[in-house]
Image (spheres, helix red, strand yellow):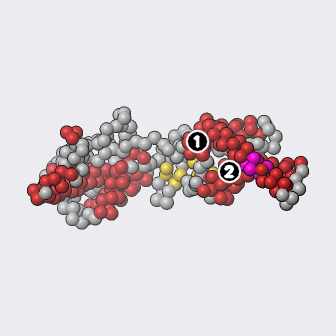
Amino acid sequence: MTHDAPPPSAGTAQFVTGEAVRLDPRVARLGSRMLARAVDLVLQVLLFVLLWMVAGLLVLILGETGLLRYDEALFEGIGVVVLVAVVVGYPVTMESVTSGRTLGKYLLGLRVVREDGGPVRFRQALTRGLVGAAVELPGLLPPLTWLACIVTMLVSPSGKRFGDYAAGTLVIHDRGVTTWGWFVRMPPPLAAWAATLDLAGLDDDLALAVRHYLARYRRLRQPARDQLGSRLAAEVAAVTRPLPPPGTPFWAYLAAVHAERQRRALHRLAAVRARSAAVWPELAEATSPWAVAGPAAPPVRGLPAPPLAGPPAPFVPGPSAPVVVPAQPGPTRPELRSPAPPAG
């Protein structure tokens, strides 16, 4: 069963990846972009003064040697060239070389991207720079063009300015708030069943795909989340035995398989370290991953979640969860009544 995807929240933009999964990065609004622009403006003023001094010094040196005859028109021409290099050349060069960042955007954690989420190229950066210089800052009719630019950014759902519309770009927050996905633990009703699993056919690539899916479960949107989870569950069920109990949601099945595989790997590692400790105790102690952790080291059997700065985000399930396999004969087992994965 599939569910309609909820609409994007305010302040986000929708990108569609090559796997047809929608991502919603947080777009940069007027405040953060104005702060980044102020940093770039200070840098541009300093750059203009530096280039003007260097160009003026070169002209004076060439004039004293008789290689160049300078006058007022020459200095005016040099001033125009330096101004264009600073106003247009600086943002175009920076955004082309750093894939959408100037110094101000870097400090504010912003980045210019294409409307499809890809990095900007020279063509997009040049279009943004030319339109920005002609229409926005300094603009042809200041301060009317400045006011028009601010109004455009306020009314645009993606916070776009004229240059963004012309180049097909937008500015997003590149350093978003990092949150933990729900940490994979063994669902208690499936612990006894998972201990009987034959995982010999589960290769590393498929196991890694399951791990990535579970880690990104909260960030995937419907219906892609359920479709991808059901497909992964079917692939895992095809190479493992026995099948899960009737009525098992696909997320619980994947979590149980992953947790059991991890538990067995930790047991094998513990056995290897025990044999190494019997032969060379000092080496085993020095190479132990929990040697410096002290009493708070995580136990081998458990998979505890790392400490969080606050309570985990609540998980809101859909109306129902797809079931991995149909009912099968056999002894009844406790069912997983909640379609929501446990919070890590």
Question: Quarter holding the C terminus?
Answer: top left
Residue drawn at (33%, 54%), measured in percent from left and top? 211
SS at circle 1: loop
Q: Could you say where residue 304 lies in the image, as x and y percent from the top left?
A: 25, 43
Amino acid at the residue labelled 2? Tyr
Q: Residue at x 70, y 53 (%)?
A: 89
Residue shown at 60% from the left, 46% from the top: 103
Q: Is tag 2's residue or tag 1's residue first in the polypeptide sequence?
A: 1
Q: Sort mark 2 into few (<14), some (14-19) or many (20+) by Cα contacts within 10 Å.
A: some
Q: Which residue is mark 1?
A: 28
- The residue under label 2 is 90
**Residue 264: image tag:** none
Q: Which segment is the magenta one?
A: 51-56
- Residue at left offset 34%, top offset 37%: 308
- From the top left corner, tell me how far across and down residue 130 is, in percent: 74, 52
Asked whether residue 329 is in view, the answer is no
